[in-house]
Structure formats: C-alpha cells, structure tokens
Image (cartoon, rainbow, N blue to C red):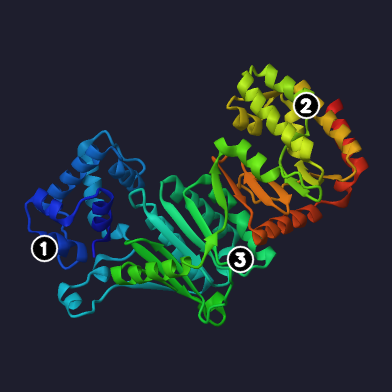
Amino acid sequence: MNRRLIILMRALNITGKELADAIHVDTSLVSKWKTGARHLSASSIHLQNMVEYFIYKDQGSGDNIIRDIVLQYDPEADLTDKNAVHTYLNKWLTDPQYSIFPTAEVASTLSEQEAGFYSTGLKVYKGNKGRQIAVLTFLDYVLTLPKGQRLLLISQEDLSWLLEDKEFLHAWQTKLIQVLHKQHQIRIIHWVDRAAGNLASILYEWLPLHLSGGIEAFYSPVYVQPMMSSTLFVVEQAVAVIGMTADDPSRNRYTALVMDPFSIKQAEWAFNHLLEKCRPLVDVHSKMDFNKIIEENLVTGRCNQITYLDTNAPLFTSMSRELLFSVLESNDVDEHATKKCIECYDHFTDNNHSSVKQIVSLAALKKAVLEEKVYNHELSVITGYDIFISKKQFMNHLQDIITAYTNHLDWEIAIEEEKTQPQGQVPINTWISYPTTVVAWSPELPLIASTKESTLLHAYIQYFETKWNLIPRINRDKQWVFKQLATLISS
C-alpha cells in the first residue's frame, strides 16, 4: 500500500479520477498504486508526471504542503531549485527506507481484497520499552506527513510506559509540540479514574499543549475499568498504534504498529465510540477574552470563596488603585482601555472577601528588581497595549503587597525558591476561585484554559496544595515573607 500517495492526494484534495485524467492513465491504475497491487516505480514516467501535477496543485493552493514534506525529508534541501523539489518528492513517495515498513511488507493484492481478506505488515513491540519505541516511531512518521492531519489518542492502560523514563517523557512532549506546530490536530481521551491526584498530574502535564492550541481533550465522567485495557494512537486514514495490557506489562505489554486501512478504520471507530460518552477536559479561549473570563469566572462576590494563586510574579490585582492608574498613564493607555482595566480591577477588589493562598517565585521577583522596566503580560492582554512597569513602580507594587498582606489576615503567601515545574516546560499561571472555577494561562502561549467542572476543580486544588506543602514551612512564615519582600525593595 502506498500510504504516502493516499495522504498527499487527500492533502491536495485530488481524487483518483482527477489524477488519472491529469497523467493520462486509467483510474483503476491509480487505485492499484494506492492499494499496493501495482508498484509505483521511481523511474516510471507516470511518477514523473504525477509529481509535476502535485507540484502544480500545491502552487495553486498556496499551502506549501510539498515544501513542508521536502524540509522534513531533508532540512538542508534547496527549495529554490525546482528540479531538487521534484527529486525529493519522488523519493518521498517511493523510498522504502523512509517508511515505517518495507514496501513488500505493506503490499496487499487486489485479489485478496476481493476475496474478503488481505495480507498486510505490522510491527509488534514488547514491554514498556517497546511501547516507547512504537510511539516515537509513530510521531516521527506523523511529522513527515502534510500538515492538517488529525490524531486520535487514548490509553486505558497504566501509564508506567509513559512516566517511568523522564527522558522519553520529554521526547514525547517535545514531539507532540512539534506535531501541533505543524498544524496537525490532536483529539485525546484521558481515561483515568476520578481520583483528584490522577487527574491533577494529567492536567498539568497537558496544560502547555492545551494552551498552544490544536488539541481537544476529553475525559469520561463515569469511570469504568475495562475488562481488557487498550491503547489507540491513530492518524486518520494513515497509521495506528494499537496496544493492550498484559501480565507484567513492563516486559510483556503488547504494541502493534499498523498501516492497513481496515485496522486503522477499526481503531478510529473504537475511539469515536468511546468519545461519545466523554466530556471536555478543559475549555480554551483566546487571550482577547482574558478580561471577560476574569470578570465572569473569577469574580463572584461570594464571601465564602477561597482563592488559590500560583503565578511567577504578582498580579496587577494586588496593586493599589492609585499605582494601577500610574502604570496605565505612564504607558499612554487611552481612556477606553484604562476604563476597561480599572473596571476589572474594581470588580475584583470590591467583591473579594475570600481567603487567599498565593505562590510566587523568588527568582522571578529578583529578576524583576534588577530590570529598569518589566513587561506585564496580563495588563498588556487586557488593555491591548504593551504595558511596562518601571523599577520604581515595581518596588511600589511590592510595598502595596506588604501593606495588603498586613491588613488581610486570611492572605497567605509562599515564596518558592526553587522551580518545581519540569525543566524546559513553560511556566503556567493558575488562578483557582473555589468553589466556582479555575483559569490557567502562560505568557509564552497563545490561549487560556478554564473549567468549572467540580471534579477537575478539586484536582487543580490538590495539585496546588501538594506544591504548597512541598515549599519549606519557613518560606510560608509571614515574618519571613515580610523580610524577603522588604529586602527586595531595599536592594
């Protein structure tokens, strides 16, 4: 089966009849090339004509699909040379060494299919190490495909294969981000029990991907342990990883990598059948809605509310109103944007009767006091201006925090001296307003995530409390926090 021919025709929106007419062959021959019943030779005049037509269609669409394929095949390729592009695409369609399987393994005959069966190739991997190899091979193959593929992911098994090797976990996350950057779409079902601890670890592992965009995540509101736990990683109409648990899974876990259409179709059906019973894990929003999300979700006016804040740097909501006006004025913010920002601030401070637990980063504070001006992400998003806070204004902000911290008996601050997030992972800011909602965002990523689902809310709180309790008790002591902030102001 020439899986790449099928995928490229789909990406360029070319039917079998259109391709046959363009290169002057019978439609049945195109079908046989796609199924593998006829071998598409690298020296065939039909292949040369086919490649010419693909390049013509790609240029007409303006999507640069072939450029992406060539650069994945060889990042050093000279794309200014049309003949080189032609040669690389020719190799991509026919080179057996650049496929998951040798060509002979995936070939199936038309006569077998007509008889109701066909022979196909698959690779089987054993144990956790085998699963890791299969998954990375799967993702490497995805990265060679034209942009716009959709991935379906679910694992009902224990996740020791994913979590036991930190180097593999980092490689897995890196490749998933590359998949998203290539404008592929991911739809994932997190099949976990509703225990807050299990949900929390998944939420935070996947948050950077949610905030990057291109991913839809779901979970089952009613957890049922399946009789035979399985794993499905599918690229629609392209390739699938099918796995099953076993006794002593670290050694005997079963994983198969398949490319035949019937197996892929069955995997797609199984995934979509499970999806029907699932709910979204988080909602994602544009950062243009940041102000609206704060007002509608985080500012409730409930006196029994508890606020949990985990941010690298203090938020503008802990400034005095006078200082906020000063910051906006010094950045030449217009009257409309200033009013919008002040209304958000007033709405929050007028209704905030809750107790507060806040984690801030000492490293971020120390870095800020050394700068002549500091970019404020949240104010920039709300106003639509690039907002910078001068060194003097930042010092005044720290003094405002000390004053509010003194007057607010239910405000606890923990100063985090060492990073607890995985190395290389972008910092995530979390604002939990219990018992209503949680909002998460990152200055480095384009979207905001939120949820009001009670189970997920408790999972976020458990993760926060775990992180809070890992911070040494002295770093949560009120007098010690006063001293650190005062030291920063006098530095």
Which image quarter: residue 389? top right
Does residue 362 sit above or below 114 in this rendering? Answer: above
Give how far apart the Cα atoms at labels 2 and 1 are.
74 Å
Observer-nearest of 413 and 223: 223
Does residue 24 sit above or below 33 in this rendering? Answer: above
Are the residues flagged by discs 3 and 2 in contact, CB closer than 8 Å? no
Of marks 3 and 2, the one in the foreground: 2
Question: Which amino acid type is shown beneath numbered disc 3?
Answer: Glu
Question: Which amino acid type is shown beneath numbered disc 1?
Answer: Ser
- In the rendering, at what x and y percent does residue 355 appear? 83, 47
Q: Which residue is mark 1?
A: 28
Q: Residue at x 39, y 55 (%)?
A: 150
Q: Which residue is mark 2?
A: 321
Q: Which mark is residue 164?
A: 3
Question: Which amino acid type is shown beneath numbered disc 2?
Answer: Arg
Among numbered discs 2 and 1, the one appearing first in the sequence: 1
Are the residues flagged by discs 2 and 1 in contact, CB closer than 8 Å? no
Does residue 172 sit above or below 104 in this rendering? Answer: above
Q: Residue at x 40, y 63 (%)?
A: 234
Q: Is residue 480 left or right of residue 354?
A: right
**Furthest-right residue in view?**
479
Q: Residue at x 54, y 72 (%)?
A: 157
Which image quarter: residue 163? bottom right
Among numbered discs 3 and 1, the one appearing first in the sequence: 1
Circle 1 packing at 10 Å, graded few (<14), some (14-19), many (20+), is few
Helix, strand or loop at mark 1 = helix
Give how far apart the Cα atoms at labels 3 and 2 are.
49 Å
Give how far apart the Cα atoms at labels 3 and 1 are.
49 Å
- In the rendering, at what x and y percent does residue 222 appear? 58, 71
Q: Is residue 264 left or right of residue 169?
A: left
